[in-house]
Amino acid sequence: MEGLIKPHGGVLVNRILEGKEREDAANRAVGLKKIRLTDREISDIEMIAIGALSPLEGFMGREDYHSVMDTMHMKNGLPWTIPITLSVTTEEANVLKTGMEVALTDEEGTVLAVMSISEIFPHDKEKEAIQVYGTSEDKHPGVKKVYEMGEMLLGGKVSVIKRPAHTKFMEQRLDPKDTRALFTEKGWKKVVGFQTRNPIHRAHEYIQKCALETVDGILIHPLVGETKSDDIPAEVRMKCYKALIEGYYPKDRVALVVNPAAMRYAGPKEAVFHALIRKNYGCTHFIIGRDHAGVGNYYGTFDAHYIFENFDPLAIGITPLFFDYTFFCKSCGGMASYKTCPHESANHIILSGTKVREMLRSGVCPPPEFSRPEVAKILIDAMQRLCRARPSNNHAAPLRGGIFFTGC
């Protein structure tokens, strides 16, 4: 792996047990107190185990938890913006104690990991909501998740016995060690990462290709962990990505890999978090467009750009690439942004989310200057299938959530 960017903290964490260690832990787990994980916590367990959240080796303790919220750095000074925590109810916490080993399970009770509890401490939900998400409103999906968590937090290292079971996107499930090996094999030294939870439209394609002009390759890294119920399903998005890459990208300079993380919708704080994750996957650069990881009107259009001013670039380690709002300009005759286009907005092809959804439901492709026809067809088919499945609620726009408008 020589020549690749170092993981955050310098070492790529691996918390997956093998051989006798795994067998011994599995045997111990039978008699341990069980803690059932939520979908988000299961994603976090996997991300910790494979090193995607390096340098974390488990769930945060009290000092890191508060330091991240107060300073956007861990207690050791390393940049970090999102608390990674495991919660339990007060009743559950009452039968636990520090030094105890517990088994972490999925919804069906399958043991995924064991954890040695190093700390048990209060979950400051209101502080987390305000300092991470910028609001205490439970209408915000990230804040709502925080409020649904338990009243106490457990800190400690985790050791994974069995990774979460996956049946989808198996060819695209590469761990950080795998993407790093892939980049080395391809001879890529400069790699730009692109986070997305939406289909890629022409504006996304434009900023990706602008970035690709300056690096060796691009990692298109869609998030396939837990998202809002009205976000476009991962299966639909993956079809869109594959169609776009097949028709419009140089295949030897693109890698499509899924990111098993859960979405937080934390706006600028999550932009930094996403950048650090891609650093662990081996990316040297990271694209940040407008309203990265945003939801509703909770964040300013370019807050995710400004937040990086709070960090030492050497400590962050990965280079953010900031892009303005992009569009097709009829006068320019191509894609442009407010940084490059001198023409009035009347010359720009910009459609509202409502208009796009109406077109897709009606089987009408948005103009090719807005979306590649192959992508639009996939979305039309998906939209119409969902509408047929909900005939009494056709106007509820089952595919919502910024279908074409947020970069991630």
Image: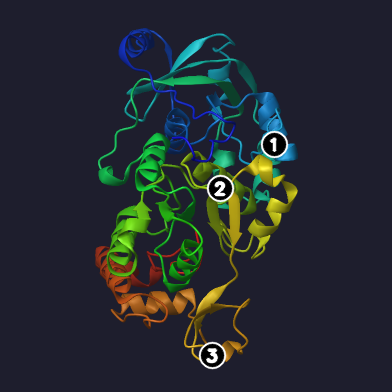
Q: Circle 2 is placed at which residue position?
A: 275
Amino acid at circle 3 = Asn
Q: Residues within 10 Å of mark 2 (few under 14, many from 20)?
A: many
Q: Circle 3 is placed at which residue position?
A: 347
For the residues labelled 3 and 2, the Cα–Cα distance comes to 34 Å
In the rendered structure, are the residues bearing label 1 and label 2 in contact, judged by CB atoms less than 8 Å apart? no
Residue 352: image x %, image y %?
49, 78
| Picture residue at 61% right of the left edge, 25% below the top | 152
Q: Is residue 86 above or below residue 356?
A: above
Residue 10 located left or right of residue 361? right
Q: Is residue 59 above or below residue 298?
A: above
Where's the N terminus, which quadrant? top left
Residue 139 located left or right of residue 382? right
Identify the element where label 1 is drawn. Answer: loop
Amino acid at circle 1 = His
Residue 246: image x %, image y %?
27, 64
| Picture residue at 25% right of the left edge, 63% below the top | 389
Sequence order check: which comes first, mark 1 or mark 3?
1
Amino acid at circle 2 = Ala
Q: Circle 1 is placed at which residue position?
A: 73
Sequence order check: which comes first, mark 3 or mark 2?
2
For the residues labelled 1 and 2, the Cα–Cα distance comes to 14 Å
Q: Residues within 10 Å of mark 1 (few under 14, many from 20)?
A: some
Q: Is residue 293 above or below residue 273?
A: below
